[in-house]
Amino acid sequence: MKLLNKEVTTQLQQVFENMKTEVTIALFTKESECETCKETDSFLNELVETSDKLHLKRYDADKNKDIAEKFQVKVVPSIVLLDHKEEYQRIKFNGIPAGHEINSFVKGILEVSGAGIPLPEAVADRLSAITKPVNIKVFVTLGCPHCPGAVEKAHKLALMNPHVEAEMIEAQTFNDLSGKFDVSSVPKIVINDQYEFVGNQSLEVFMEEIEKTQISVQ
Amino acid sequence: MDLQFDVGFMNNRNENVSEQTMPNYVDVVIVGAGPAGLSAGIYAQRKGLKTIVIGSSIGGQVNDTSSVENYPGFSSISGEALSHMFYDHAISLDLSVIKDTKVIEISNQGKAKLVVLEKGNAIRAKTVVIATGSTHRTLGVKGENRLAGKGVVYCAICDGPLFQDREVIVAGGGNSAVEAAIDLSKIAKKVSLVHRSLLRADQILIDRMNDLDNIDVYLETQILEVLGENRVKGVRVKNKNTQVERDIQADGVFVEVGYTPNTSLVNGFVEMNDRGEILTDTKMQTNVPGIFAAGDVVEGHYKQIVIAAGDGAKAALSASEYINYLSNEEELINEIA
């Protein structure tokens, strides 16, 4: 059964015409203990058909431990977007980006392909002062209309600063992780497993929380 | 897991105007891009008025509705899909829509209006339609703020899936509350709907709810407190008839107790009632000439998508009349001079 209907396929084709460079989608799966790996694979297989600039590489996370480690892949299914040199851009989607989340996934692809929208200058200035590692987790559900906005912001910040990485986490698929971070409302944003807020807040709010991680402990 | 793809990105390619490229003088500025704002836009554009819609969210609250079953022409449609259709319709008429942008000030500037956007850009207009909608109301009880996002939630379609096989409470008795209870009954183990008076939801929804065996309904029951330290443990309620207090255990509280109008933008500028709703005449004109209002933000008893859309139409037609009157008057002044 095809996951993407004709209408969605046409829309994807049109949107991807804006891509400037090639993008490789690296998918990490496992043979067992992964309920959504198979459908994530089918989804991506159909998605890459919509543009010549899209490529799919499949990895078994157990058999390719070194590559998984290089891209900080810790769960499956996990999708990593790589640029035209197949280099890690520090953005990931853990769980299938279906439902509303296809919007942030498409935006992520456009960003990595060089067709992104610049950050507001004031935010870019603050972001350039970030020099210590930052990890942003954005917990989402697929029925949440506000969630893609938060994922897009987190990913944009990661793309613009080599010390920042950002990952979408589908809260239902990764129930244990959601429980660990007490996710009862989405989008929930967790920074360096320590600072958190709820909602698709402004880039300024993201920056405020990120800046908290930069204060050195004496 | 529901594997459908809700594509909203298609709207991006339709963006025909931005804050940077917007004109500096128009006939109508519409603030808000929900059903009222987009309907006003469609009517104004078709009247040949130079129109611009500025909104922070396309579709507004409609997006938070899992399924809309009372908008004529659609026996059942997702809120998201309906707002896409509103937007696509508006865009097909070449209506200018600035998205993801807030208006921070509206004032009189001679006979024109000055509308200031959050990034400091401003636009002048002959008329303004305020269609800023409303946001969910809070319960206003002890524990609610402390546990917000820790079990107290305000978006059933967003946060419902996080309560799989858990027990939840829905607070409220209107259509949104009953719909939330029905949706949640498919995910949660048990749903308790708690409402301080009698249900005011549509009978068709109440019947559907009553058919489900994992929903308990507590009417004329007031929530006194949300219980729990770092996570919701339940609520303390009081039955209004018996005055008996008891605790209901739950992992989540879904608050669906109505809406409060988004009128901070025009506070002190146009007349409002004590609930903060904008007062208008039957042609949607506020007490300030040239300023109109439509949708949930306006004083009125029923907050419905179809009513908001109807209000929007009235406001746009009324703005058009006002503009005609203005230009006639100008001609008159010119003739005399």
Image: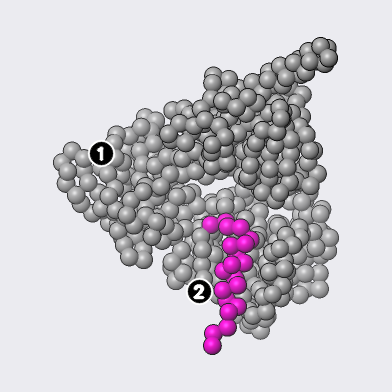
Question: x, y (%) of residue B273?
Answer: 45, 31
In the displayed structure, A36 sits above or below B17; it is below
- Graded by Cα atoms within 10 Å as few (under 14), some (14 to 19) or many (20 or more), the crowding at tag 1 reads some
The residue identified by callout 2 is A194
Label 2 element class: loop
Residue at point 79%, 59% (across, down): A115
Residue B105, by quadrant, is: top right
The residue identified by callout 1 is B220
Indicate the amino acid at tag 1: Glu
Residue at point 79%, 15% (across, down): B333
Question: x, y (%) of residue B18?
Answer: 76, 45
- A202 in the magenta segment: yes
Q: How many marks?
A: 2
Screen quadrant of the C terminus of chain A? bottom right
Drawn side of residue A89 relative to residue A97, left or right: right
Question: x, y (%) of residue A168?
Answer: 59, 65
